[in-house]
Image (cartoon, rainbow, N blue to C red):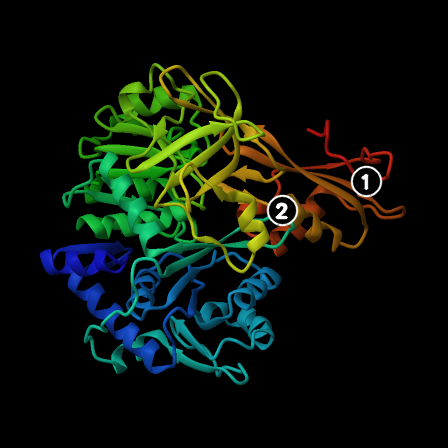
Amino acid sequence: MLLNNFLEQSTEKFPDKTALVFQKERLTYQEINSSANRLANGLKDSGVERGERVAIFLENSVESVISIFGILKADAVFVVINSTTKKDKLTYILNNCRVKVLISSFDKSELLKEVLPDVSWIKFVLLTGEKKSENTFTDKKICQFKELLNSYPDKKHINRNIDIDLASIIYTSGTTGNPKGVMLTHLNMVSAANSITEYLENTSDDIIFDVLPLSFDYGLYQVLMGFKIGGRIILEKSFSYPYVIIDLMLKEKVTGLPGVPTIFAILLQLEDLKKQNFDSLRYITNTAAALPVTFIKKIKETFPKAKLYSMYGLTECKRVSYLPPEELNRRPASVGKGMPNEEVYIVSENDKRLGPGEVGELVVRGSNVMLGYWELPEETAKVLKPGLYPRERVLYTGDLFKMDEEGFLYFVGRKDDIIKCRGEKVSPKEIENILYNLEGVLEVAVVGVPDEILGEAIKAFVVLKEGFNLSEKDILRHCYLNLEDFMVPKYVELVESLPKTESGKITKVGLK
């Protein structure tokens, strides 16, 4: 099965059913499938070949959903890029995977004017929204998204791809500072969606609320899984207006609410939330960081009929484990056991299988495990290693875990210095490089510090050059201008010096 078959099969079963709600738009499965077919035909006519990459640089929107499936229908590979990504990183990603077509918005024209001249691979740009002025993009063919859809028939393109072909590349932070492209095949993504919808017991009656960015695999999979089961997705750009979100949840009779601790922290502060009738809400899921025990109690009191699933995962395999709701009271700190059609175990540094109570690296085997990192064989070899059986490779997560006597998993920490903030992997090196570009900064060390809501919060220790008088606000302003939102430090501390080794290298040991 291919990933785009999720949409196609649900269209056959429920052609006139509302599949997607976004702001004032309500689209049926037939309408989305028809638009995706038109886009696929337009991409093919524009020269997109099998396996070539098409990037989506948009906020959550109807167009972003249509684009995902249109790209898949064209036998191409979709690359969803966070809409807050700044110039240098955007240029790097587009060049790194040699993007052929970019789908973005007229609202991003100023940024694209700076980026596109440095990306020779892109031959065609599709822009959503209304054209505001004459474009000055040299040597790039530009078309309005709606115009392209209106120019092509909705005849289905016959796929040449098979399930071991690439479906998506998702970029995640790397230890070198440059993001790494996680290569996911149709088999990887279909397998993950099958397993998750199995333990969540999803059906076509489910109405799933999605405020998470589609560039975040947690947000992306809500759409994929919703279309797989023939359910309905209520899509929003963000959780910026919580009371509006609550009203919409009640109006649409939402049955599934995926969230992260930051969202639940905001929700649980709303006045009179317990007075609302959330009887339709069947389940709540959480990942990114473990929910504080106090949150678990409040969520259960506020949404008494909803099952609460605590989960753990990483982009390289989507999901690893989930804690059955009935176990939540007994083991609130656990992230559960491996999900269906997957095996997990813990090993020592010399690859010895460890037993209950012993701390080691978590290993994952299953068809949901990525193909590797895009054109990074050495980085791939560090995490995909020979497994239990000949010719298989398993994923070494880089996360330290222990398990109890019954096999339930407990997160202990990271092996490397990658920070896990809001469920996203954040490279301290990438933030440090940006800070070193700020005039007046002499030395920098970025670390993760424990945070009840974020999992880890980002903290930057900064030493200034003599004669400069930058404030914490000046430094944060520079970060906001040059980093994606989730990478901006929560804390900045100005210090006289940083600890160093005998060789003069900055050491982060003891910084907190």
Name the residue located 22 percent from the left edge and 55 percent from the top edge.
Answer: 6
* Residue 291: image tag: none
Would residue 3 be visible to someone looking at this image? Answer: yes
- Mark 1 burial class by Cα count in 10 Å: few <14, some 14-19, many 20+: few
Q: Quadrant of residue 497?
A: top right
The N terminus, quarter of image: bottom left
Would residue 262 be visible to someone looking at this image? Answer: no
Label 2 is placed on what type of residue? Answer: Thr
For mark 2, what is the residue?
Answer: 175
Seen in the picture, residue 40 relative to 46 is either above or below; the reply is above
Q: Residue 396 appears at what percent x and percent y? A: 50, 38
- Mark 2 burial class by Cα count in 10 Å: few <14, some 14-19, many 20+: some
Name the residue located 45 percent from the left edge and 17 percent from the top edge.
Answer: 356
For mark 1, what is the residue?
Answer: 505
Q: Quadrant of residue 165?
A: bottom left
Seen in the picture, residue 294 relative to 260 is either above or below; the reply is above
Q: Residue 456 appears at what percent x and percent y? A: 56, 33
Q: Quadrant of residue 308?
A: top left
Seen in the picture, residue 108 relative to 351 is either above or below; the reply is below
